[in-house]
């Protein structure tokens, strides 16, 4: 309100001043006389002032017309002028509008519209580093692989967009299943931009799939250096790669390099079970059983595993069952309540023909979620204690229907592996295998494996029960006494048969 009042007052003051000036000029005597040739003009003071103002305006207008003429001539000549800048701004505005609409169309899934807008934006902007990327992505979305590849190749010509072009072609090769070419392109992309985390992961995965363990370890070190991988995760995965490198060297027949790589893998990650086993066997071959024992004890402390027990047994392969049981006491004192510890102890007692001790070692495993291994050991115990065949077969039949227990399972796709591998054979994921119980599968048929205990045998000995009066008499002579060693051997055969039956059922 105050500002409006001030403007009104100023306007009135200016009008009043102009009026007073005009009145003053009208009252003045004299004037201005202009004589040009034979023409003479006499102007009053007021007319003189008005003529001066008209003259100034005419000069200003003439200068502007001259500048416009010069600008038009320069524009026609191709020079940069205000007129050309005006048209450039107009084209740029239209080009960025088309580019924005193309990006929105790409985000909305309208591939053809996005390609059209990209072509329009290229026409106005003439900036291929912006429009080619939009064209390539729109062509991929539309399924035009040839157009996308051609556009990505155009991006290779510019240093600013070379990484984008290499990465785009790499992803196309991955989609086509050409892993070798994709791996080479990933290496070039990493050389252009080492800090790109997604490309690091892709290269590491491709190198692991190609069994290029040395290159994978270099990529892993790069991830640690660039800060895209925690140090503890790097240590674990570097151990996995070192172990994989040891297995590869072992396949080539170079035992010395394999042994050193396995020892290095165990040093990097002592809780990695395969690394501990390989390193222990390496020390055994070098005649250093104490170092092998120390490695296996440390790994057993982290997680008991049957492979660790097998490697521990390989330290003294020719010892008697009693001596082995005594030597294993130091190992079994670690994690005594673990399931694997109980199973290994029971197996050792069976080998030593101490079947009551084996039963006690099993503890509550038979009642608390038993697996096929525990039930098979129980069948061996029953056989060793002289139970009838019907009881032993009953335990074996129950083992067929029981879970298999912990196995090497991929945490990504839950595929089961017979042995540890660095890369999942199903989903090709790296370092995803863990020793765990796989998801349980139910038997669909009521007359299948679940009926085997009723068909093959019972879990209890009913031979002492009184026979019905109408039952036929059995004049078969009693079974001869079987030595305990043969009992254990027969039990082992039954275990193998049970496993084969269960595989057939699968």
Image (cartoon, helix red, strand yellow):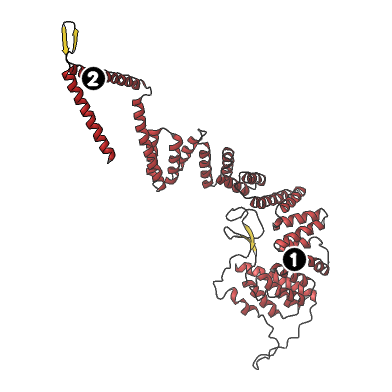
Q: Residue at x 20, y 17 (%)?
A: 51
Q: Position of residue 414 (x, y in %)?
A: 58, 60
Where's the N terminus, which quadrant?
top left
Q: Position of residue 443 (x, y in %)?
A: 56, 71
The residue that label 1 is drawn on is 334
Looking at the rendering, which quadrant does residue 20 occupy?
top left
Residue 294, can we see it? yes
Q: Residue at x 38, y 22 (%)?
A: 79
Camera-nearest residue between 377 and 331: 331
- Judge depth for marks 2 and 1 and give the one in front: 2
Q: CA distance from mark 2 to mark 1?
A: 110 Å
Looking at the rendering, which quadrant does residue 147 occupy?
top left
Q: Secondary structure at mark 2?
A: helix
Camera-nearest residue between 371 and 78: 78
Q: Secondary structure at mark 1?
A: loop
Contact between marks 2 and 1 (CB within 8 A): the answer is: no
């Amino acid at each position: 309100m105050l500002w409006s009042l001030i403007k009104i007052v100023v306007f009135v003051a200016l009008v009043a001043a102009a009026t007073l000036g005009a009145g003053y000029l009208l009252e003045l005597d004299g004037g201005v006389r202009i004589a040009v040739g034979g023409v003479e003009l006499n102007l009053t003071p007021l007319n003189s002032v008005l003529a001066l103002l008209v003259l100034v305006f005419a000069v200003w207008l003439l200068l502007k017309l001259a500048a416009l003429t010069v600008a038009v001539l320069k524009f026609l000549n191709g020079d940069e002028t205000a007129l050309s800048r005006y048209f450039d701004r107009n084209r740029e505005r239209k080009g960025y509008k088309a580019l924005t609409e193309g990006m929105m169309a790409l985000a909305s899934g309208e591939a053809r519209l996005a390609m059209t807008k990209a072509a329009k934006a290229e026409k106005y902007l003439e900036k291929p580093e912006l429009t080619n990327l939009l064209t390539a992505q729109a062509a991929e979305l539309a399924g035009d692989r040839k157009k996308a590849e051609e556009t990505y190749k155009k991006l290779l010509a510019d240093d600013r967009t070379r990484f984008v072009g290499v990465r785009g072609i790499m992803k196309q090769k991955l989609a086509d299943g050409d892993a070798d070419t994709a791996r080479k392109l990933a290496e070039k992309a990493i050389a252009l931009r080492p800090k790109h985390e997604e490309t690091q992961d892709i290269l590491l995965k491709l190198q692991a799939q190609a069994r290029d363990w040395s290159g994978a370890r270099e990529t892993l070190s790069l991830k640690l250096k660039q800060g895209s991988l925690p140090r503890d995760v790097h240590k674990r995965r570097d151990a996995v790669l070192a172990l994989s490198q040891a297995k590869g060297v072992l396949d080539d027949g170079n035992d010395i390099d394999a042994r050193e790589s396995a020892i290095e893998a165990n040093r990097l990650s002592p809780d990695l079970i395969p690394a501990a086993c390989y390193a222990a066997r390496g020390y055994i071959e070098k005649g250093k059983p104490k170092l092998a024992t120390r490695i296996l004890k440390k790994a057993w402390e982290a997680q008991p595993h049957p492979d660790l027990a097998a490697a521990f047994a390989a330290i003294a392969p020719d010892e008697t069952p009693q001596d082995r049981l005594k030597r294993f006491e130091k190992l079994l004192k670690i994690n005594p309540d673990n399931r694997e510890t109980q199973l290994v102890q029971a197996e050792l007692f069976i080998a030593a023909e101490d079947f009551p001790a084996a039963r006690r070692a099993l503890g509550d495993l038979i009642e608390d979620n038993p697996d096929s291994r525990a039930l098979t050991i129980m069948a061996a115990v029953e056989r060793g204690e002289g139970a009838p065949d019907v009881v032993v077969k009953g335990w074996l039949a129950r083992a067929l229907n029981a879970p298999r227990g912990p196995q090497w399972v991929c945490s990504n796709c839950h595929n089961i592996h017979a042995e540890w591998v660095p890369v999942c054979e199903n989903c090709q994921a790296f370092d995803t295998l863990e020793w765990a119980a796989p998801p349980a599968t139910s038997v669909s048929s009521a007359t299948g494996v679940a009926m085997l205990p009723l068909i093959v045998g019972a879990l209890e000995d009913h031979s002492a029960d009184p026979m019905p009066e109408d039952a036929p008499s059995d004049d078969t002579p009693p079974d001869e006494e079987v030595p305990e060693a043969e009992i254990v051997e027969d039990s082992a055969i039954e275990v193998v048969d049970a496993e084969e039956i269960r595989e057939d059922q699968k």
